[in-house]
Image (spheres, rainbow, N blue to C red):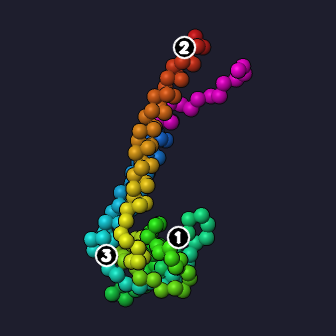
Amino acid sequence: MTGRRRPLPPLWLFVGGGAAVVVAFAVATFGVWRNDTALEERGVETSGRVVAVSDGKIKRVRVEFSTPDGRRVEALVGQGDEARDPRPRVNDTVPIVYDPDNPTDDVRDSRVEPNHHMAYTLLGVTIFGAVGVPLAAWHLAREHRRRRAASS
């Protein structure tokens, strides 16, 4: 194949960008895991009124509830933490578990067993990136060296 070769990104930019993405997924994994664990360890059960169900590929449920001190709080039901049958609709009342230390964090529909599905998914993506970025960077560095050698 003749013609111009596609320019390669600078190695430092690829490694820096890849590291930033891996760190962002690691932080997200930790946050989701921390919230899931808090709900298991100190979660308080109450009922919440569904105020919104987002449309789109990922349906998120937003609920409103009151804490014992009388505060009205809105929070999202965690992804994978909402009942599938029947699916909550606006103005439905659903039993939820929330973290009294952080009531605005994601809550869990108490009809759903505690799980770490989202945390495990994020962990898998983090591990994939932690392995894949160095391998891709090694390949990119090799290609840079090969092109430099071919042009001299």
Please check the rendered image and state whether residue 7 is part of the magenta-colored stretch, yes or no. yes
Total numbered labels placed on residues in the image: 3
Q: Residue 128, relative to residue 65: is it above or below?
A: above
State the residue position of label 3. 43
Give percent across and percent down for residue 71. Answer: 39, 85
Asked which secondary structure carries label 3, the reply is: loop
Give percent across and percent down for residue 147. Answer: 57, 19
Q: Nearer the viewer, residue 121 or 15?
A: 121
Q: Residue at x 58, y 13 (%)?
A: 150
Image quadrant assignment for residue 149: top right
Asked which secondary structure carries label 2, the reply is: helix
How would you rate the neighbour count of disc 3 (Cα within 10 Å): few for under 14, some for 14-19, many for 20 or more? many
Give the quadrant of the C terminus: top right
Give the quadrant of the N terminus: top right
Which amino acid lies under the numbered mark 2 shown in the image of this protein? Ala
Q: Residue 60 has which mark?
A: 1
State the residue position of label 2. 149
Contact between labelled residues 1 and 3, with CB atoms less than 8 Å apart = no
Magenta region: 1-15
73 relative to 100 in the view: left or right: right
* Residue lying at the far left of the rendered structure: 41
Give percent across and percent down for residue 62. Answer: 50, 76
Q: Residue at x 58, y 29 (%)?
A: 8
Residues under labels 3 and 1: Cα distance? 20 Å
Residues under labels 2 and 1: Cα distance? 53 Å
Which amino acid lies under the numbered mark 3 shown in the image of this protein? Gly
55 relative to 84 in the view: left or right: right
